[in-house]
Image: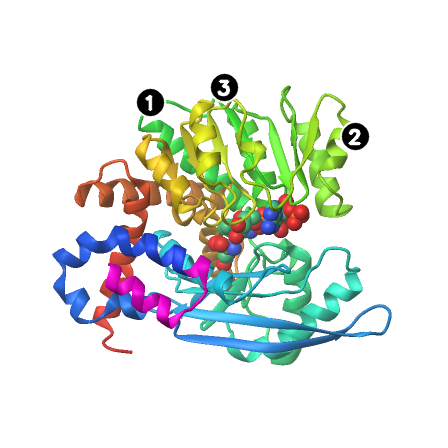
Amino acid sequence: MKEFMTMCEACNPGEMEFLQAVSEVVESVQPVLDRHPEYRKAKILERMVEPERIIICRVPWVDDKGEVQINRGYRIQINGAIGPYKGGFRFHPSVNMSILKFLAFEQQFKNALTTLPMGGAKGGSNFDPKGKSDNEVMKFCQSFMMEIWRHIGPDTDVPAGDIGVGRREIGYMFGMYKKLKNEFTGVLTGKGREWGGSLIRPEATGYGAVYFASEMLGTRNETMEGKICLVSGSGNVAQFTVEKILELGGKVVTLSDSSGYIYDESGITREKLDYVMQLKNVERGRIKEYADKYRDAVYTPIDPGQDGNPLWNHKAHCAFPSATQNEINGKDASNLVKNGVYVVSEGANMPTTPEGVEIFVDKKVLYGPGKAANAGGVSVSGLEMTQNSMRMSWSREEVDAHLQKIMKSIHRACVDAAMEYGTPGNYVNGANIAGFVKIAEAMLAQGIV
Ligand code: NDP
Ligand code: 2IT
């Protein structure tokens, strides 16, 4: 493992997030490689850390003041062994090669777990949609798609949303793809329901993370009923995580954005959640305003440089990190355990640092890593692709039933793989191994490509 990581560090210098994601998987799959020398011989792992293709492009656009702006766009097609490349676009000023490579790397295993035929990809740009007008967002999306359209397609690569990319951005990109290609196809998922989108896709990641938590709780004959939950973020994933927790009888006491967090001891009700949705999705405001409206709630600003996040230092049973990578460090993980949290279901991708993960695993927390717990989003994206291919659309109930079945099956695959390889109850190993084996078998069958 040491040798492998040294090689990886030399090939990907300074790519901290990517190396972090790789190192966790490499550790988990050692026993698989020991049992399957054919994977070693075919250099499966070495191939998995080398994207099949990376596209980097200039994205020029003109802002509302008439000034020329230039961003950098990316698409990383990491592994196409089990289906067309699939994964979201992230628009955020922090986007760089390391972040997108870690996300693409995780995505290939996540997609393998969904039971659906999807390869792994990720993309995006350092474009910051915050404070931009709709017109500026449209100009950027159109310029990005003017390059990316030639690299994607319904049977080639199907992008979707992630941080900073929702229905609005998908719409502008879809419009430009359709114009350039002169084809109406399911080339992107997360579309509006009037133009080929699947019902439940907006809800799917958050709902899925809560279904996954319910499955983990089920192993101890417990349910979400009455559970006090900490949720971070206040975007797409966080909002629908709260919605499902409320439906299942739990209570949510926190939400956040990159400026700070609110603690509402009396609980975020349906009415308060509707306010958050309006605030975040329509007015594009800050979570601080929640505490201005609901005076019992306490707002605490968060300094990005500070050690640890006080959001994770409240009494609760469950935590749903739903903002971004490395938002729970070792100190936060210790605080969570100290405060009684014994279920962590990751809506975000890699929100826990390796030190944090070690604490959760050590303390026998029911810890669902992102690539399993947040796979509901890409799963319903897969179902959107199916509906587009059939030129049909399914009802809410049908899609939700599929989603629940898929989350159960992912949970089962994690439990079984962890058991088979001698670490029962370890969902990190379970998810990494189950995802890895599926892709490895496909790669082995398809030869050295
Ligand atoms: P949104 O853009 O809808 O919301 C992101 C939320 O996280 C916002 O509240 C944002 O605050 C906060 N956030 C983003 N970056 C940071 C940061 N650096 N520090 C602190 N807070 C931050 O994104 P999503 O809800 O779609 O994505 C959230 C997470 O879920 C990401 O990790 C994403 O990769 C993951 N995910 C998303 C899926 C999807 O279907 N959308 C599927 C699977 C995983 P602010 O507004 O201040 O930036
Ligand atoms: O991280 C993820 O799984 C996503 N952002 C969703 C990807 C998708 O193709 O729906």
Q: Distance between the residues labelled 1 and 3?
A: 14 Å
Q: Is the residue at mark 2 in contact range of ligand 1, meaning its CB lies under 8 Å from it?
A: no
On whether ligand 1 comes within 8 Å of the CB at mark 1, the answer is no
- Mark closer to the observer (1, 2): 2
Indicate left or right for 408 with 296 as reference: left
What's the magenta region? Answer: 1-18
Residue plotted at (42% across, 68% down) = 13
The residue closer to the viewer here, 304 or 202, is 304
Badge count: 3
Q: Do the residues labelled 1 and 2 touch (CB within 8 Å)?
A: no
Q: In this view, does 157 lie to the left or right of 70?
A: left
Task: Write down the residue under mark 2.
Answer: 292
Magenta-drawn stretch contains 14: yes
**Mark 1 = which residue?**
221
Q: Which label's residue is closer to the chain start, 3 or 2?
A: 3
Name the residue tied to disc 3.
226
First in sequence, mark 1 or 2: give its number: 1
* Circle 1/circle 3 CB separation < 8 Å: no
Tell me the distance, in whole angstroms, between the alpha carbons under discs 3 and 2. Answer: 27 Å
User: According to the image, what is the colour scheme of the structure?
Assistant: rainbow
Residue 63 rendering spot, x and y as whole percentages = 80, 70
